[in-house]
Structure formats: structure tokens, C-alpha cells
Amino acid sequence: MKPRRAQPLERLVDAHPVWVDTGPENTCSANRRGVEILFDCPIHEDCLCSVPVDPPLDGGPTFEARGWKRTGGEDFATVTLAPSIKRLGGPDGCEWHGFIRNGLFETCGDSR
């Protein structure tokens, strides 16, 4: 398990979020814009979370088989993803389960 932060992050904007694009080097046939959000785990140090979003920023189909429903625009301060993001028992040692609602993290009680 990753070491816990001294103070959990409350806002997505404080987790160094970036939109992930695809390019010709990927298996996708065309460049895609904003297919995932990559951000620091709100409760663990040295842990990144990557979440495919539906719809991507370019308005095309979801890049992965399963994407989290995105509401809000490109602004990380207002984005909402549903359902919850559950990273329990993964190989990278991140044990976070929670929501991103209106740009805020809501950590569930089963996070470790």
C-alpha cells in the first residue's frame, strides 16, 4: 500500500490533473482529445489515477470499453464523474475509492 498523505486533497485542481489525448502512436486510428483524466491520488503519495471519460472532450465515442460519465466542461474545478472511482486491491498499491463531484473529491469509507 502507498504511504498516505498527511492531509488528503479536497479539490481535483490540487491533484495536478491533466487531460490525456491520443495520437498516431496509439492504436486509435485518429488523434483524440481529452479521452482520460490523469491526476494524483487524493489520499496517497506517489500514486496516479487515470480515468477514461465519456464523452471525451472531442465529443467522439469513448476511447476505452468503459468510461466514467463526465458532466461539466474542460474546467477541473467543475467536472463531475460517475460512478465512483474504485481502485481497491490494484497492483500499484493505491487503495482509494471515491467520487469526483463538482471538482471535489469525496472519499468513501472503504479507502485504505
Image (spheres, grey):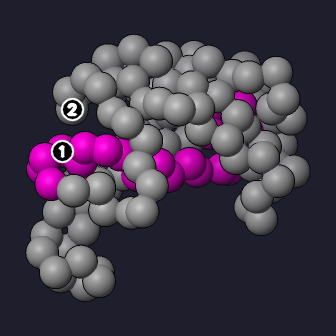
Magenta-colored segment: predominant secondary structure: loop
Foreground disc of the pair 1, 2: 1
Q: Nearer the viewer, residue 112 or 70?
A: 70
Please give the name of the residue rendered at 18% of the width and 44% of the height, measured from the top-left corner. 57
Left or right, 10 with respect to 30, comes to right
Looking at the image, tell me whether mark 1 or mark 2 is earlier in sequence order: 1
Left or right, 86 with respect to 38, comes to right
Residue 57: image tag: 1
- The amino acid sitting under disc 2 is Glu
Q: Nearer the viewer, residue 53 or 25?
A: 53
Left or right, 48 with respect to 14, comes to right
Please give the name of the residue rendered at 74% of the width and 22% of the height, measured from the top-left corner. 108
Percent position (x, y) of residue 40?
A: 56, 41
Q: Is mark 2 on a helix, strand or loop?
A: loop
Q: Are marks 1 and 2 in contact (CB under 8 Å)?
A: yes
Q: Does the magenta stretch include residue 47?
A: yes
Percent position (x, y) of residue 88?
A: 78, 46
Q: What stretch is highlighted in magenta?
A: 41-60
Q: Is mark 1 on a helix, strand or loop?
A: loop
- The amino acid sitting under disc 1 is Leu
Q: Can residue 45 be seen in this view?
A: no
Give the tally of numbered discs: 2
Left or right, 6 with respect to 32, comes to right
Residue 74: image tag: 2
Quarter in which the C terminus is drawn: top right
